[in-house]
Amino acid sequence: MNRNAVKRMREQLLLSKTELARKAAVSPLTIDRVEKGMTCRVETKRKILLALGFDISEKTKVFPEL
């Protein structure tokens, strides 16, 4: 499992998992899995990055493995 900063970034923005899921157009279960470090598609990571307000060029701030 990979470590990422999705949970930390989401909490800094005071967003619930459901709110982030809605903004990213993914399910809350997907957000939960990503926060736990499970793998997901690159497209899902892109949606989450944009929903958190990051540019694609800043991807390593949230997903260090990219």
Image (cartoon, rainbow, N blue to C red):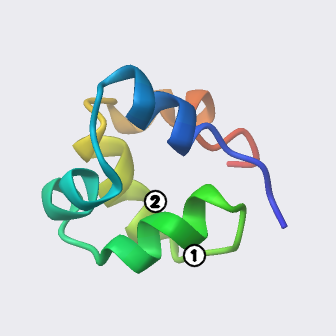
Find residue 13 and report its horizontal and vertical position in percent.
31, 24
Position of the N terminus by quadrant: bottom right
Counting residues from the start of the chain, the first of labels 1 and 2 encountered is 1
Numbered disc 2: secondary structure: helix
Q: Residue at x 30, y 37 (%)?
A: 52
Q: Specify the farthest residue to the top.
A: 12
Q: Specify the farthest residue to the right.
A: 1
Check disc 1 and give the amino acid type. Answer: Cys
Find residue 18 and report its horizontal and vertical position in percent.
25, 61
49 over 13 or under it: above or below: below
Disc 1 and disc 2: Cα gap in Å?
Answer: 7 Å
Numbered circles on residues, count: 2
Check disc 2 and give the amino acid type. Answer: Lys
61 over 65 or under it: above or below: above
| Numbered circle sitting on residue 52 | none
Mark 2 closeness class: few <14, some 14–19, many ≥20 residues within 10 Å: many
Q: Residue at x 36, y 53 (%)?
A: 48
Mark 1 closeness class: few <14, some 14–19, many ≥20 residues within 10 Å: few
Q: Residue at x 34, y 55 (%)?
A: 17
Horizontally, is 40 left or right of 27 in the view?
right
Horizontally, is 6 left or right of 26 in the view?
right
Circles 1, 2 touching at the beta carbon (< 8 Å): yes
Q: Residue at x 26, y 43 (%)?
A: 50
| Numbered circle sitting on residue 40 | 1
Find residue 16 and report its horizontal and vertical position in percent.
30, 47
Numbered disc 1: secondary structure: loop
Find residue 60 and report its horizontal and vertical position in percent.
62, 33
Horizontally, is 16 left or right of 8 in the view?
left
| Numbered circle sitting on residue 45 | 2
